């Protein structure tokens, strides 16, 4: 793997692709999604570490006017990884496998923290406190290593 001013070359992907082609579609998908999930784990962990946490319970208002009392830690518990559905894949990703980090409902308090993007990107009156982008940027090389190692292990396991 080399990195020159933001460019990255990943060595060995042609070999992985060749070996992946030896598997049927179901096993290939299973191998890919397992490797993608494994690769994203450090990003999710760091994003949760970086996510701001309220000092005390507060009230969140949804666009329809409904209000919900929110406990500290909702945002952190709502950060997770998920498979990107085929219907959401377009362009060069339309035929592949994809996973991403997203904000869903909290694990303990089953509500969606609709304010997360204000924290990540800021507002005219509230400075940004990014937690997703830095987690991704800090883990690019680790993600690539974890992905290729896990995919190689998966392929070898399924070819046995």
Image (cartoon, rainbow, N blue to C red):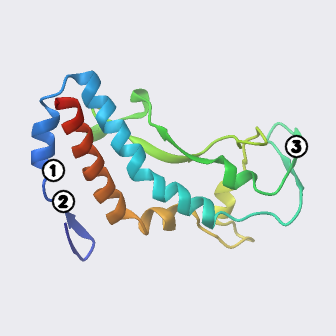
Crowd band around label 2 with a 10 angstrom C-alpha radius: few (<14), some (14–19), many (20+): few
Q: Position of residue 33 (x, y in %)?
A: 36, 37
Q: Could you say which disc has been placed on residue 68 in the image?
A: 3
Q: Quadrant of residue 138?
A: bottom left
**Element class at badge 2:** loop
The residue drawn where x is 73% and y is 70% is: 126
Q: Earlier in the sequence, mark 1 or mark 3?
A: 1
Q: Quadrant of residue 124?
A: bottom right
Is residue 21 rendered to the left or right of residue 32? left
Quarter the N terminus occupies: bottom left
Report the Cα–Cα distance between label 3 and label 2. Answer: 46 Å
Residue extending farthest to the front is 160
Contact (Cβ within 8 Å) of mark 1 with mark 2: yes
The residue drawn where x is 76% and y is 56% is: 73
Using the image as rendered, state which of residue 135 and residue 24 is in the foreground.
24
| Residue that carries the numbered disc 2 in the rendered image | 10
Quarter the C terminus occupies: top left
The residue drawn where x is 37% and y is 35% is: 89
Residue 89 visible here: yes
| Residue that carries the numbered disc 1 in the rendered image | 13
Residue 115 visible here: no
Position of 30 relative to 81 (above/below): above
């Amino acid at each position: 793997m080399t990195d020159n001013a933001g460019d990255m070359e990943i060595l060995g992907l042609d070999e992985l692709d060749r070996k992946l082609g030896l598997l049927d579609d179901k096993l290939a998908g299973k191998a890919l999604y397992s490797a993608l999930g494994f690769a994203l784990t450090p990003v999710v962990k760091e994003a949760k570490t970086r996510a701001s946490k309220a000092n005390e319970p507060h009230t969140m208002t949804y666009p329809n006017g409904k209000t919900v009392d929110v406990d500290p830690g909702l945002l952190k518990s709502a950060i997770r990884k998920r498979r990107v559905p085929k219907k959401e894949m377009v362009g060069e990703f339309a035929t592949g496998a994809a996973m991403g980090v997203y904000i869903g409902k909290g694990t303990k308090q089953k509500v969606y923290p609709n304010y997360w993007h204000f924290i990540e990107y800021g507002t005219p009156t509230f400075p940004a406190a990014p937690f997703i982008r830095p987690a991704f940027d800090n883990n690019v090389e680790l993600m690539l290593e974890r992905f290729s190692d896990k995919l190689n292990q998966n392929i070898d396991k399924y070819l046995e």
